[in-house]
Image (spheres, coloured by chain):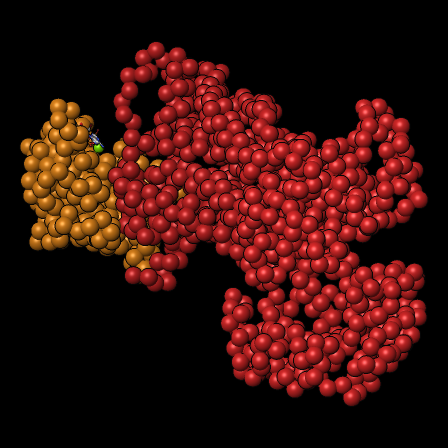
Amino acid sequence: MINVANKRIIRTLAFRQIKAGETRNLFAIAAIVLTSVLITAVVTLGFNLMDANMQMMMKQSGQTAEVSFQYLAEDEAARIAAHPLVKEYGISKYIGFASGDEWSQTPLEIRTADAKHAEFTFSTPTAGRLPEAENEVAIKSWMLDALGLPREIGAAFPLSFMIGGTQHNLSLTVCGIWEDDYYIHPYGTAYISGTLADKLLAGTDIEESRHNGTYSGVIQLAANLNGRQGDLQGNLDKLTLEAGLDAELTAPRVNYAYASSASDTGTIAAIVLILVIVLISGYLLIYNIFYISVAMDIKHYGLLKTIGTTRAQIKRIVNIQAFIFCLIGIPIGLLLGYLLAVLLFPLMLAATTLDASLSTSATNPLIFLAAALLALITVFISCNHPARIAGRISPVEATRYTAASTQKRTTKSGYNGASVARMAYANLFRNRKKTIITLASVSFGLILFNVVFTFTNSFDVDKTVAGFIQGDFLIADGSYFSGGNSYYSPTYTLTEEAIEKLAGLDGAAHVAEVYHEVAEGQTAGAGTPVPALTYGLDEHWLDILEGNVVAGVFDRGKFLSGEYIVIGADMQNSLSVGDTVNLNFKGESGGKQYEVMAKVDYSGAVNVLSAKYITGAGFSAYLPETEFTALPKANIMSATVIADGGNAAWLGENIKAVLAGIPELDFRSRTDYEAEMENSNRQIAFVGVALCVIILLIGVLNFVNTVITNILSRKYEFAMLQAIGMTARQSKNMLVLECVYFELIAAAIFISVGYGASFGIVRLLAENTAAYTYEFTALPFLFCFPLLGLIAFALPRQIYRGISKNSVVERLREIE
Amino acid sequence: MEILKTLDLVKHYGAGDNAVRALDGVNISVQSGEFVAVVGTSGSGKSTLLHMLGGLDRPTRGKVFVADNDLFSMNDDALTIFRRRKIGFVFQSYNLVPILNVYENIVLPAGLDGGAADAEYISSIIEALGLADKKNSLPNNLSGGQQQRVAIARALSAKPAIILADEPTGNLDTKTSGEVVLLLKMMNERLKQTVVMITHNEEIAQTADRIIRIEDGKVV
Ligand SMILES: Nc1ncnc2c1ncn2[C@@H]1O[C@H](COP(=O)(O)OP(=O)(O)OP(=O)(O)O)[C@@H](O)[C@H]1O
Ligand SMILES: [Mg+2]
């Protein structure tokens, strides 16, 4: 049956119908544009967020390559490089580590690296280049700071190290510099040239250095593989096996940034949820537009049926039109959506824990493909049912004389009063389905808008700030602030003298310290000791500790005795209340026995009293500060100044003055944190509200379309009503009333479901995150309903004026 | 040769006490090449009968045979395809497709069928119906009589077994009505085209070969 000629006539019919229906086209295209704007924006934001996440993890892992071998000999590296599974690779040879006081705290590795390897490890010089000549070296920029040298190419960089028992003292010329975050990778890297490396390594047996653990001359190879990305581990195993390598010895690894993590699944779930919401609202709008369009053209389709158009052919007529609308609407939507995402992404990034400097406006063509496909699918699902309805229309419809209402009218005796108000009410439900879909679409937008608005409005600054600062001013080493306290390691920069000065300031009621040391924790019965992140707390903090106890009972007196500890409730540690642990602060033998008194949840306020999270074996322990003041040397992590309620700004100035002499220290005030949190909430609110406004717009567009098509399809009816004595004014009032009734129902839904939903959702979130407290706001209602009211009053009058230009007789005549 | 036959055709609208017996056991037969007029008072069931004859609607009971095909044994799609090949319609309100021009309207049934229309035949009927200079006009720019001639041309275009016309002159003035009926009659004679036409007009009915009278859903 499918042949060229009938396809052509079907196409002609579809094209001509588009030509004839200007208003309808406008709405259909606008609907598709809005829907694809949203889809594209959400997909792009999602992609970028995941990309940023991945980049962040790569930065943490220090590598972008998919896999790496840590310890290879020359021939092994050559075999891997030649293997067909390897798509691209970079090589770096380990030489040794630098000696000297500057590098005693932060190890400095000396290596060679080819350009690819440098690219894989974020160490391509941003100024200068990689070393070529024997006397050249490329280094991280902060390494120059550490030696008190200017960040300049050409500086002389001293390097002392041992290889195979020989001491080398070189002075090399800096030929390249790159930026690296010290707090993420607290170790130095110096790249030397291959020629120098060969000279230095002459006489070194690589096999031996690999076995004795000096690793001089051992090669690290980082590579991207061919084959399926999802099975990196499998491919790496295969590669290791086929290259004939000993996995134990060469340590092949998959970059953990490529292993999908829990945070990724969370992001994906959130994006999918938002996408589903977007798709539903797009569906409701596009469905309604096509449904109404088919209902208005019922006579046309009936006629085509009479003449012998089959169901499939009629469905195709509808689908071709949908496709043409997509051809126009989707590209516009893709472009606008992408621009919107580019605009919103930095705001979104700023509001997350991700590094805002990440360069992720990834223009992945996959984004557009996915968004276009999703939009296309949405349109075709939306018009599938209307197309089926069109196909099912009975040919007898063609012979019905009036072009007016298309639905079965169950004779109602409701018109007897015939007041305008009663007619309006009856008209509202003339086509129940159309009304309900429009109502659903409008309410959906309104409810969502309300939820998001209430949500961001319920952001609780005090609650959030509580996780960062308790008190008025927080003083600590610069690294505590710049890397986020979760990267903090003891620095010994905050001293007792400084604290005494702070305590003596006018307006400072109290200064509460937190001591922090990494100790060796030996639990009873366990073999090797594990790291224990220990914190010595000022008495001031004990209330917070007590308030966050999740197991055991906190006894102040017992705690202060110094025989007990409180530990962080952690999935990783198997300690329970009543266990005894031995803490050894100096790494010597001995130490002291403590009993575990209680466990605290350290995600909320206790965060202020803590540094790094425990990611491997180990635990965090909270002790009274007396346990630390007794130590010969104890690191003070932070000092919190509690003001006596006087002039806080003046106190802040004084603190600044005290700290002026100690450049390593930095401080933040409570107001700083509040401003920061407010700002990040405002940014996330902006993203949410921007997306919601479009969804709201979709609802409003649906409403406007319904109103317009409704009036147009009743042209004949209005002419008739006027012929029998209803004035134009009465007709207009009736139409306005229909809209008003509609909005009253929408308002009822909004107040009940909308406020119910936002209350429920915010409550749910408030229980899980510490940042929200439900707060009622009437703003969304006050924003939306006047707008809808304006439409209700202005639009029907305008459209009615349009259809009632001609005389009644003429209007009654023009039936087609 | 018998081209159209009904067997105890019954059509009820609604159910129970409110049921309307629009057709109440109609048995008619039409010979090939015949020009038959159907007359009756308003609401007697003429249009309903015509809908059944053309397979536009399904009867409550009974059968309709067109060129020996049992219409209602076919499913909807088969019936639709049968209709565009074997049955031509002319309605009171012309029912042209407003977005297609005159020529496109005329060849629409053939186009839907995928076959190319018989161009020579089409141009001969366009000529005969006096539409030659209106081929590219849109229906809305034509007079009622012209529109009805287009509808007749469209009904003829697929060389159907039978043309069914429901008050084709209902919207036309007396003079134009006469012309349209004359054209139908001419086509009936020249092409041996079977025509069943509903009319209210006794004078027009008299031009037919035979008159079928319907009263309260029954042939009288
Ligand atoms: N779709 C329908 N639903 C219910 N009743 C119908 C329907 N179509 C027709 N009828 C009823 O069936 C009966 C016959 O109607 P029909 O249209 O066949 O009459 P008619 O002879 O064509 O009248 P007219 O000369 O006015 O066109 C009438 O009583 C009419 O009210
Ligand atoms: Mg009739």
Camera-side residue: A326 or A513? Answer: A513
**Numbered disc total:** 0
* Up-down relation of residue A56 to residue A433 (above or below): below
Q: Where is residue A126 in the image (x, y as percent from the top left)?
A: 81, 65
* Up-down relation of residue A606 to residue A262 (above or below): above
**Quadrant placement of the C terminus of chain A:** top left
Q: Residue furthest bottom?
A: A203
Q: Position of residue A555 (x, y in %)?
A: 62, 33
Relative horizontal placement of residue B219, taking residue A441 as reference (left or right): left
* Up-down relation of residue B129 to residue A157 (above or below): above
- x 36%, y 13%: residue: A418
Residue A190 visible here? yes
Camera-side residue: A530 or A72? Answer: A530
Q: Quadrant of residue A693?
A: top right
Q: Quadrant of residue A194?
A: bottom right
- x 76%, y 85%: residue: A204
Which chain: red?
A
Residue A87 visible here? no
Relative horizontal placement of residue A605, taking residue A188 as reference (left or right): left
Which chain: orange?
B
- x 58%, y 53%: residue: A524
Q: Where is residue A390 in the image (x, y as percent from the top left)?
A: 34, 44
Ligand 1 in which quarter? top left
**Quadrant placement of the N terminus of chain A:** bottom left
Q: Position of residue B167 (x, y in %)?
A: 23, 36
